[in-house]
Image: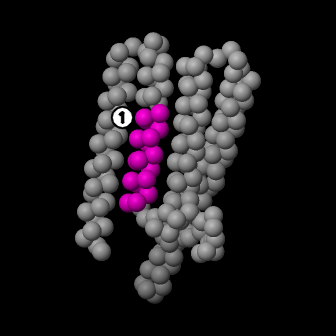
């Protein structure tokens, strides 16, 4: 009788991973909103190009890059998280569109990729601040630089610890 209860509980625990599915579907909705934002910024850039300064064009392009990087981050979270924590994504192994990283993803690798993407997004925000430096106070710029450096150091430490963990297991 206890063995049946234990097996039932283990099955419930194993099936609980599917609770995450609506979360990943919500992230797909968020990705769609980011795509909408991308096209909105692109349309604004296209429709106002003659009246924009070089700095304004650069800021708009950086905003497009920023949206793209966040969208990439969302795709990594959606695909990597779903594959790691819910269920494998069944794509033909020879399919030309299957991302290479998808087969090698685990929780640690996913963390490093996500952290690296966050550093990229932070770098884009910092570059936007530098391009538009006249509109920022020195303390705000210093604060952004500090945050970026903390992100960068965190990624390096995380990547190094993942390397150490993988070298011990292989």
Q: Where residue 11 sits in the image (x, y, percent)? A: 51, 76
Quadrant of the drawing holding the C terminus = bottom left
Residue matched to label 1 = 148
Residue at left 68%, top 26%? 45
Over which residues does the magenta segment extend?
108-124
At 35% from the left and 15% from the top, the residue drawn is: 138
Residue drawn at (60%, 27%) of the image: 60
Counting from the top left corner in percent of width and height, residue 14 is at: 50, 72
Q: Position of residue 112 (x, y in %)?
A: 39, 53
Q: Is residue 82 visible?
A: no
For this view, does 95 lie left or right of residue 112?
A: right
Q: Nearer the viewer, residue 128 or 75?
A: 128
* Quarter of the figure with residue 88: bottom right
Can residue 161 be seen here? The reply is yes
- Badge 1 local density, few (<14 within 10 Å), some, or many (20+)? many
As displayed, is residue 34 above or below residue 94? above
Residue under the point 50% across and 69% down? 103
């Amino acid at each position: 009788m206890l063995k049946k209860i234990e097996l039932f509980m283990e099955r419930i625990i194993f099936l609980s991973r599917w609770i995450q599915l609506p979360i990943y579907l919500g992230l797909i909705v968020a990705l769609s909103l980011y795509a909408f934002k991308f096209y909105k910024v692109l349309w604004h850039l296209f429709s106002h190009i003659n009246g924009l300064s070089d700095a304004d064009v650069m800021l708009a392009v950086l905003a497009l890059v920023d949206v793209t990087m966040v969208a990439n981050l969302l795709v990594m979270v959606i695909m990597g998280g779903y594959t790691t924590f819910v269920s494998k994504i069944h794509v033909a192994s020879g399919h030309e569109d299957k991302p290479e990283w998808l087969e090698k993803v685990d929780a640690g690798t996913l963390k490093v990729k996500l952290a690296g993407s966050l550093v990229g997004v932070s770098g884009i925000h910092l570059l936007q601040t530098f391009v538009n430096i006249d509109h920022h106070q020195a303390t705000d710029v210093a604060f952004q630089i500090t945050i970026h450096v903390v992100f960068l150091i965190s990624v390096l430490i995380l990547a190094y610890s993942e390397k150490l963990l993988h070298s011990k297991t292989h």
